[in-house]
Image (cartoon, rainbow, N blue to C red):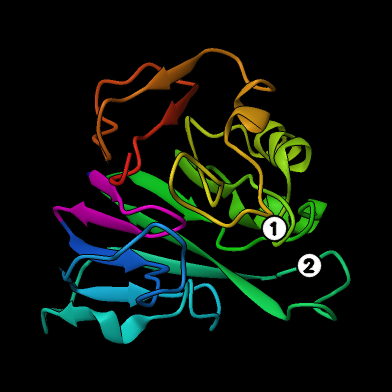
Amino acid sequence: MKLTWYGHSCFLVETAEGSAVLDPYAPGSVPGLTLPPLRADLVLCSHGHRDHGHAQGVTLTGETPALRVETLDTWHDDKGGALRGPNTVHILEAEGLRLAHLGDLGHMLSREQIQALGRIDILLIPVGGHYTIGPETAAEVVRALRPGITVPMHYRGAGFGYDVIGPVEDFTRLCGPVLHLDGNVLCPEGLETPATVLLRCPVE
């Protein structure tokens, strides 16, 4: 399995059983970021906002992937969707690994949602706050799910992201040791777990 982060909440997941792009953003929707042309078997969007739902920006291969996709209904805020509507969590299973992309999760997961997610090997989690859960709630979600690998997303960095969301350091200071990768690609095989992995945004 190979994950490539394109900033914000957009990832390309490539496996022996198929590929998927998660939450591609539209041109001009995220300060400092430009999404390159992407190609995959599937495109999965957590919700329809321009910074997460630009499915037409991904070229589909036409292949039918063998990877398994599950969904979990959540909210984009802590008011039952009254502020920002629904949010879909996507769970991808391939090569014996379960990966969960939490999209723009806006609340702590319930006990029932935690049970429904089950074992998570790789967790892609928003941490910047304002539009999503913030660092403290994100850390609480990680403690509840106990993933093997945690990858923070949807935060502000040097030259990219919304001014109103926080930097990743607000989350990583709540974690144990953090593995900083000198690139935007993660291959989970061989990594010691549990681990928080910080990828390098392409614009940095």
Q: Quadrant of residue 23?
A: bottom left
Residue 86 vs residue 177: left or right? right
Query: Which labelled disc corresponds to residue 77?
Result: 2
Task: Say if 12 sits above or below 195 in the image.
Answer: below
Query: Which labelled disc corresponds to residue 132?
Result: 1
**Disc 1 secondary structure class:** loop
Task: Say if 74 sits above or below 129 in the image.
Answer: below
Q: Residues within 10 Å of mark 2 (few under 14, many from 20)?
A: many
Mark 1 residue type: Thr
Q: Residues within 10 Å of mark 1 (few under 14, many from 20)?
A: many
**Disc 2 secondary structure class:** loop
Residue 132 vs residue 152: left or right? right
Residue 7 among magenta residues: yes
Query: 14 or 135: which is nearer to us?
Result: 135
Residue at (65% x, 36% y) in the render: 142
Residue 109 among magenta residues: no
Mark 2 residue type: Asp
Residue 2, position in %: x, y?
Answer: 22, 44
Query: 33 or 187: which is nearer to us?
Result: 33
Q: Quadrant of the N terminus?
A: top left
Residue at (46% x, 39% y) in the render: 158
> Residues in magenta?
2-16
